[in-house]
Image: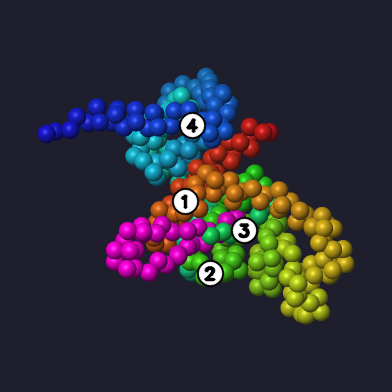
Amino acid sequence: MARHWREYDERLVKLGEEMFSGASGFLQLNIEKVKQELEDLNRGKVGRPYQYPRFIIQVGMGLSKFMPYRQASGALKGIFGFAPHYVTLRKRILKEAEHWDCREIRGGYLFTLKDVEAGEYFIDSTGLACSQTGEWRTIRFEEKRVRKWFKLHVLYDERGRIVAFAMTESRVSDSEVFEELVRNLPPGTKVYGDRAYSSRKIYKIAKSRGIKIISPPKRNFSSRRRGCKELQQQVKLLRKYGYQRWSRITGYFKRFAMEWLFSSFKRLFGEKLRAKTLKTAFFAVLNAVLLFNAIAFHNSCTKN
């Protein structure tokens, strides 16, 4: 029996609209601000193409990885009350992807924004668990339950927007990924990280790129050991003024206010991945990052 494609398309759009109807409250979105931006973009405009706020396309980009474009178009309509046609949505999403650069690195995969401005950035990492087989399979086939997880390395700005992230195996250290994460940062940039990024190797990489890394030195570091002048200065400052005053002098206290990012990310998308391989886990996190960036950017604009 032949499928009636028009009815099939409309049914998928309707399904997405019903699924996400009223989701704006959950996502804490200012719908009126988005509608105002839509009007401003098209006021006095003659001819095509019809302009949509970039925020709409970014949300659609995240949703389209979980569902067909037709259903994603319906989901946008359920959230905002309007949405581009699914063909238009696909074209705009492909254009939006040009802003990012994806490449394979040692021990994982890296995704970075191409155009990044100088400023203050924060770097951190966390673990994400992989999906496990059910209890029935474990008991029936007497399989050994093995816990497996991957590591998510993130570089983000003051607004909470993720500008670079990497998915690696759990054994990959933070220092091994640091050089790749900061590759696109312009000279004069400050990067704040925890003690995992306090090493001579990282300080030398930052110096070679004209970047200033600020990280609390480890307790066993000595200010007399040669090899890195910048790290020695941090050790002397910390011992002279103490941790609280050192964080004020160096600006490290700003990192405390940005600790919300990982908790917000995991509240929205969970701590477990529906993936068993590193490559599939990477693309699963990519979808979440795109959607998270769109929401974080929208909320920062709303506050301002």
Where does the image place residue 259, in percent across and percent down from the top left?
Answer: 66, 51
Q: What's the residue at 40%, 53% (across, down)?
A: 274
Residue stretch rendered in magenta on the structure: 128-155
What's the amino acid at mark 3?
A: Asp
Which kind of residue does numbered mark 4 sit on? Ala
Residue extending furthest toward the front:
139
> Where does residue 115 sit, x and y in percent of width and height?
57, 50
Q: In which quarter of the image is the N terminus?
A: top left
Disc on the earlier residue, 1 or 2? 2
Left or right: where does residue 208 sit relative to residue 171? right
Q: In the rendered view, does 243 fall on the left or right side of 207?
A: right
**Residue 236 drawn above or below residue 56:** below
User: Any mark on residue 172, and which?
Assistant: 2
Q: Which disc, if any, is residue 124?
A: 3
Q: Does the magenta stretch include residue 135?
A: yes
Where, by quadrant of the figure, is residue 77 drawn?
top left
Q: In which quarter of the image is residue 189?
A: bottom right
Pointers 3 and 2 in contact (C-beta within 8 Å): no
Q: Is mark 3 on a helix, strand or loop?
A: strand
Q: In the image, is residue 295 above or below residue 208? A: above
